[in-house]
Amino acid sequence: MSFMDTFSLTGKVALITGGAGLYGRQLVRALAEAGAETFVASRNLETLTGLADTLAGDGLNIHPVQFDQGEEASALALRDHILEQSGHIDVLVNNAVARPMKKGYQDDLGAFAESMRINATGLFAVTRAIGDVMVTKGSGSIVNIGSIQGMIGPDQFIYRGTEMNGWYPDYFFHKGGMINFTRFIASYYGANGVRCNCVSPGGFWTTSMPESFVRQYGERTFLGRLANETDLMGAVVFLASEASAYITGVNLPVDGGYTAK
C-alpha cells in the first residue's frame, strides 16, 4: 500500500448519523467519494432517500436507514441491520444532533432534559453499540462531530444587530461533554485497536444568515469567513482512514482559526 492509499476508505463500511443536515450532507459525500460503503441514518428517512437519489446522480451509492438516537433499541437495530447487510462496521461518524431548546436559556427544563436524552445518552448508546462491534474486528475509527461551542463560551459580538444569540445551554453542555467523552472512548477501546477523535467545526454559512452576522463572524476568524460546503470533508476522511492510525483522543477544531486566538 502506498502512502496516499492510506487516505482511502475503499473496502470499509461507514455509518454516519444525522446525515441530511448542514454538516451531514458534505460528510456523507466525503465518505462515499473516499470509497466507503456508506450508511446514513436519521429520523427523517424521506430526506435521506432524497439525499441518496441526489448522490446517485454523481455515481455514489449510499444506504439510508431510519434511526432515532433517543432510543437505544433503535441504535441496536441499526447496528444489526448494517451487520446483516455488510458483515462489519469500520467507521462511525456521530453527527446527529437535536435542538429542542427553541426558547434558549429560559426554556422549560423538560427541553434541556430532552436534549440530554438524545445528544448525551443517545450518543453513548450508539457509540457503545457500534464500538463493541469494532472491538470484535480489532480495528475501527469513531469520529464525533462536536462544535467550537464545546470549547468556548458564547460571543455576543458576532450577533450584534441581529435577532440571533448564543444562549443555548444544552448545546454548549453536550458539545463540551462530547470532547471529554471522546477521550474516554479513545481510552476504553484503545487496547482493542479502536480509535476515537472529535472534530469541532466553526460556524457554517447559510443563505438565511444576516449580512451583519456573516461579517462579524468572519472578523473573529483568521481566514475571514464561515465554513462552506466542503470544509469538513478532509478532516473527517483523514480521521476515519488509516492515514491517522496513530491519532486518538484528539479534538480537532475546523474553524478558520476562530479558537486559536
Image (tube, grey):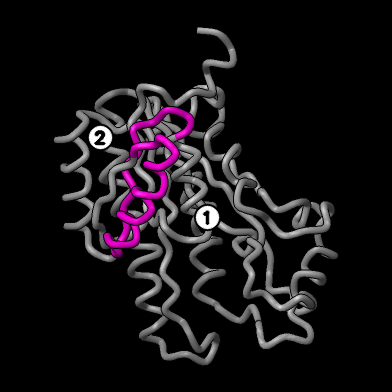
Q: Secondary structure at mark 2?
A: helix
Judged left or right of residue 215, residue 113 is left
Image position, residue 132 (x, y; %): 27, 37
**Residue carrying label 1:** 23
Residue 185 visible here:
yes
**Which residue corresponds to the image point at 49% horizontal and 65% vertical from the top-left?**
174
Residue 187 visible here:
no
Residue 191 occupies quadrant: top left
**Which residue corresponds to the image point at 61% horizontal and 81% vertical from the top-left?**
167
The C terminus appears in which quarter of the rendering? Answer: bottom right
**Residue carrying label 2:** 133
Image position, residue 223 (x, y; %): 82, 52
CA distance separating discs 2 and 1: 26 Å
In the depicted structure, whether residue 19 falls above or below residue 206: above
In the depicted structure, whether residue 61 falls above or below residue 121: above
Mark 2, other Cα within 10 Å: few <14 / some 14–19 / many ≥20: some
> Which range is magenta?
33-61
**39 drawn magenta:** yes
Amino acid marked by disc 2: Val
**Which residue corresponds to the image point at 30% horizontal and 64% vertical from the top-left?**
44
Identify the mark at residue 158; answer none if there is no mark. none
**147 drawn magenta:** no
Marked residue nearer the N-terminal end (2 or 1): 1
Mark 1, other Cα within 10 Å: few <14 / some 14–19 / many ≥20: many
Amino acid marked by disc 1: Tyr
Image position, residue 2 (x, y; %): 55, 8
Disc nearest the viewer among 2 and 1: 1
Residue 12 occupies quadrant: top left
